[in-house]
Amino acid sequence: MGWRASESSPPIDKLVLHPNFCEILASKLGEIGMAVEELQSIIKRCQILEEQDFKEEDFGLFQLAGQRCIEEGHIDQLLEIIQNEKNKVIIKNMGWNLIGPVVRCLLCKDKEDAKRKVCFLIFDLLVKLCNPKELLLGLLELIEEPSGKQISQSILLLLQPLQTVIQKLHNKAYSIGLALSTLWNQLSLLPVPYSKEQIQMDDYGLCQCCKALIEFTKPFVEEVIDNKENSLENEKLKDELLKFCFKSLKCPLLTAQFLEQSEEGGNDPFRYFASEIIGFLSAIGHPFPKMIFNHGRKKRTWNYLEFEEEEDKQLADSMASLAYLVFVQGIRIDQLPMVLSPLYLLQFNMGHIEVFLQRTEESVISKGLELLENSLLRIEDSSLLYQYLEIKSFLTVPQRKKSLAMLQLYINKLDSQGKYTLFRCLLNTSNHSGVEAFIIQNIKNQIDMSLKRTHNNKWFTGPQLVSLLDLVLFLPEGAETDLLQNSDRIMASLNLLRYLVIKDNENDNQTGLWTELGNIENNFLKPLHIGLNMSKAHYEAEIKNSQEAQKSKDLCSITVGGEEIPNMPPEMQLKVLHSALFTFDLIESVLARVEELIEIKTKSTSEENIGIK
C-alpha cells in the first residue's frame, strides 16, 4: 500500500516549507562532509572485492579521504566506519595508512579533549585491527619524524602500541632490532640533563623515555629467559637485546650524571635505567662476573658473532661505562666475587679509565677520575709495584693532566721504583710547567724521606737520583728559554736545589749533588742568569713603550710569555709587564740565595778538609 495523505493533511500543492529549509538542509549535509562521503564511497566499492583485488589506487584514495575526515573534524563518523564489522577486511589492509594522521592529531595540543578521546579510540582500534607488519613500519616512520622536544612526546605515545604490534609478529628478532635501533637513534639526539634541577625538570623528556623504554623491553627479555629451547630465532633476539643494552651503556649512560644516593630517594631515573640495563645484560648474557671481566681478552667470551663485529670504539665506551656504574655507583656490585684483589681491580680498570680520559666532555672525564680514585683507594700506599708501569695505560693515564689531586693519589700508591719511573716519564712528556713543578716537588719529598731512613733508597739517592736531576736542573732551550712561561718549573727546580745544598753535606754526598755541581752550574745556573738579564731587559723596554703609548692614549700589542696580547689599554699593559718583572725578581732572589748557600757549603767543606790535614 502506498503512502497517502491523511484527511487532515494539507494538499501537497499547498505545503508551506520553512523559510530557511534549504540552508538547514545544506548545513546538515555539510556536517556529514564530502570527505566522509568519499570515504564511504571507496569502502562501498571495496566491500565487494577480495583482499587480493585491492588496487594501489584504492589505498591512496582511502588514505586521502580518511585524512580529510580527521582534518575537517568528522572524527566520530570515521570511528563508526572503523567499528563497522563489514569493513574489517578493508581496515586490516588499508587502515595503517591512517596511523600518521591520527598520531599527528593526538600530538596536536590544540585539539579539543573530546576529539582527542575519539582519536585515541581510533588509534587503539587501528593497532588492534591492522596488518602488524605494515603497522610496524608506519610507527617507526612516525618515531623518526620529530625533532627537539617532540622526539620524546612521539616516543612516549607510540612505545606501548609498538610493543603490542611486535608481539603479534613471528620474526621478533628482526622487528625488535629495527625498533630498538630506531628508538636509540632518536634518543641519542636528546641533550642529557646534568644537574639535579635539570634531571627533575626533564625538559626534553629523556628521563621519562628511559623509564618507558625499560617497560617496552622487559617482555622481550623475559621471552628470551623463558625460552629454554635456544632456537636460532631466540639467539637472534638475545643478540639484538644485548646490542641495545651496550648501546644504552654508551648513550645516555656514559655522559649521564647520577644524583647523590642520600638525596635521590630512589627517584634517580638514570640509576634506575642503568640498574635495569645491567640486569638485562646479566639475565640474557653470560654470568655477570664473566661478562664484565672477560670482555676484551684475546679469547672472547661472547658467542654472538654479529655483536662482535660492532666497532671496537663503541664497545670500549660501553665497557668503560659499565665499569663506572658497577665500581663507582655500586650498581649490581653485589653480584661480583669478593675475593678479587685491589691490585687486580686497578689493573682491570686502568684501560677503562684511559677511555674516559681520552674524551673531551668534562662530565665523562670526571667519571674516569672517579673510577681511578675508587680503584686507588683500595690499595695501600707504596704497594703498587713498578712492573705495573710496563702496562701502557699505567703510564698514559697519569699524563692526562686533568687532576693533580688524583695524580698525587696515584703517586702515593706506587713503590719507589714505580715513582721514579713515573717521574722520569712525566718530566719527559708533560710539556706543562705546572705539572712539572708538581712532579719536582714530589721528587723533593721522596729525597727527604730517603735521607731520613737508616738505609738509603737507591732510587732517590746516588747515581739514580743524579740521572733524574739531569731532567730537573736544566733549561729546555738554554738562555733562550721563555722564563715566564716556565716560571713554575724553574722556581720548583731552584727550591729543590736549595734543599739539596742545605740537607746534603759535600763530604757525605748522598744525593750525588756535589759531584755534579759543575754540570748543574753550566746547564742550569749560568744559562738562568743570562736568561734573566735578557728577559728583564725585554720587559723593561716593553714598559717604556707602554708608558709612551699611555701618553698618546693609543692601543698597542705586547708580547708576554711568548704570546702576543693585542689591543690592551696601556694601564692594563703596565700591570701585566710589572707582574712579569716581579716574577723575574723572585726567581733572581732564589737563585742568588742558592748560589750563596753553595759558596758557604763549599768554603766550609774546604776549611774542614784543611783542618783534617
Image: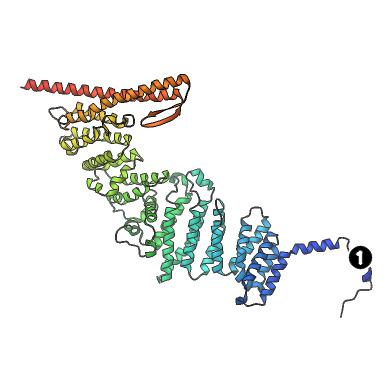
Q: Is residue 124 above or below residue 503?
A: below
Q: Report how many numbered discs are placed on residues in the image.
A: 1
Report the residue at 42% width, 45% height from top.
361
Instruction: Specify the quadrant of the image occupied by residue 470.
Output: top left
Q: Position of residue 161 (x, y in %)?
A: 56, 63
Is 253 positioned to the left or the right of 492 in the image? right
Residue drawn where x is 53% and y is 48% of the image: 202
Residue of label 1: 16
Query: From this viewpoint, is residue 342 visible?
Result: no
Quarter of the rendering containing residue 441: top left
Residue 502 position (above or below residue 251): above
Dot 1: element: loop
User: Which of the pair 260/220 is nearer the observer?
Assistant: 220
Q: Name the amino acid type tagged 1.
A: Val
The x and y percentages for residue 381 are 26, 41
Q: Is residue 161 left or right of residue 351?
A: right
Q: Crowding near pointer 1: few (<14 within 10 Å), some, many (20+)?
A: few
**Render colour scheme:** rainbow
